[in-house]
Image (spheres, grey):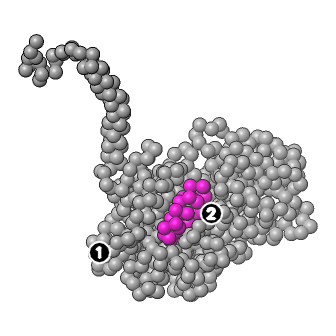
Amino acid sequence: MTRSPIARVRPDIFEPPTTPLERRRRSRRRIAAVLALVIVAPSLLWGGTLAYRDLSCGPIGNGISRVDGQCVGVTDGSFVFHPDIEQIQQRIRKENEKVRNGGYGNLPYVRIAVLMPMTADDRSALTMARIRYSLQGAYAAQRRANGGADDGFGDPTPLIELLLANEGSNQQQWRPPVSRLTNMTTGPHPLVAVVGLGVSIPATQLAAEELSRHQVATVGAVLTADTLRADSFVQVSPSNGHYALALRNYLDQEYPEGHSDRRRGIVVYDQNSDMYTRTLREAYEQHLEDFMVEGPAQQFNGILNEEEPVPLFDHVSTQVCAAKAVRIFYAGRVKELRNHFIPSLARKHCADREENNEQLTIMLGTTGLSSLRDEETVDLLKRHRIRVVYASSIDPDGWNGRADELLGSEQQDALPEFLSGMPVGYPSFYQKLHALFSTQEADDALADGYAAMHHDAVATAVLATRQAARERKESVPTHKHVASALWKLNILGEVPAAGGTLSFSPEGLGWPSGKPIPILSIPPDAQPPTSTSKPYIT
């Protein structure tokens, strides 16, 4: 039978195979078609989802992509990572546009990136408020850098474009932004430094190592874990070892040798693998051993994610009471201290302490403790005779008040380095923040050390950049030359930072010299009696 020409072109007409060979071939073709569909269909679906996800983080090619459900990457401020930081991002974007469009007279410019979480969730070490304060401090440093010699950073060349790099709410998505940053180190306006780097966790170490592998100058802002090290990597914050030494300096004055309460401290630590808490505990044990009771340290399980149960502190509070300790050296995150440990201590009635009317002191080292200054927590501390004494990167209450008094004073330039414990660089930072933001915004940002430390990280990168430019007699230095210049920020090249007049050298392993570490107290009226003396200086 002759096949109809219509049958050859109409797909709805089925002609059965006429031979065994043709039947086998057709069967193989059907199997191949089914297998192809099985393989290709998920790919098509994934591809469609990927395209949607990319667009949900802005247009393709904007430097932002969705990774693990988060928009991560690098922006000049145009892409807003979170509504809480939209206003400060837009200010940074406008300043960047002014730099690029000749608003400062077509001067050469380079790029410095702030790498840190730009979003937060229940697990995050940084809240959205602290992220906002950090960016406000970085922006203040950018404005000072671009503002001319009168703003404290010397010759304003090259100018600074400030990029924002989001590494995810818990820093686990650091690879995409770091990869993009290391590919931005060439061209007429190269990336020369990265600052910030979030908090002291393993992801921070990995990011620092990758940036150093590409010889990118890197400046940590609020990093304190002593084990955080990499080439071309410095920190403007004290280390946990420095914090412990500052606490010892205070304790030696408060409880000299032979004092009956000298050896009445106990370590309470988070047993999770956390670089900050682990190295803080090690620093206590190394530098404060002769202030501790006989017996083991007490441990608890900190919260690593929202699915984990609330940490139980009642057994720790019982052990503290049994040891007759009046001093706790706390090595854990502030969130657990505020939400769980302090309430547990308040519930525990220690007969010996109550009989002797003794106060319980919690001691630690941290960038800032503004989260413990709310009315409810302060009232709880007061009612149960508990105080928190901590070594800090700045003294917000003390320095803000003195800076406010000194603004406009003719004697400001002649201040000795630590007049009343305040660094000479702090008033300029304080003044700039109040000039850029409303009084309420500035006061909020100045409540702890996050704005100041991120300001100082950018300032350090700026001065290293300009040091490299002078040395090389180039208007735009390379990232490698800036990385080398970090180690020359000393003697005549010190950084007039908000947190101190800082200097860096290879011998210091990246930690700053010249950083004062004040000892502060909550409640404020429980201020340590030695607070009027000069602070410990790194």
Question: Residue, x 82% and y 43% (percent of image)?
Answer: 318
Look at mark 1 in the image and give the residue it sits on. 103
User: Residue 436, image x and y in percent?
Assistant: 41, 68
**Secondary-structure class at tag 2:** loop
| Residue kind at label 1, given as amino acid type | Gly
User: Residue 192, image x and y in percent?
Assistant: 44, 72
Q: How busy is the neighbourhood of tag 1: few (under 14 within 10 Å), some, or many (20 plus)?
A: few
Location of residue 149 by image quarter: bottom left
| Residue kind at label 2, given as amino acid type | Leu
Which mark is drawn over residue 514?
A: none
Q: Is residue 198 magenta?
A: yes
Q: Is residue 492 above or below residue 299?
A: below
Q: How busy is the neighbourhood of tag 2: few (under 14 within 10 Å), some, or many (20 plus)?
A: many
User: Residue 300, image x and y in percent?
Assistant: 73, 45
> Mark 2 vs mark 1: which is more N-terminal?
1
Question: Residue, x 65% and y 57% (percent of image)?
Answer: 276
Left or right: 453, with 284 as reference point: left
The N terminus lies in quadrant: top left
Q: What whole-number distance in Å separates the C-alpha atoms at marks 2 and 1?
A: 39 Å
Left or right: 493, with 79 as reference point: right
Q: Given this view, does label 2 or label 1 mark the residue nearer the observer?
A: 2
Q: Is residue 270 visible?
A: yes
The part of the chain drawn in magenta is: 197-224
Look at mark 2 in the image and give the residue it sits on. 228
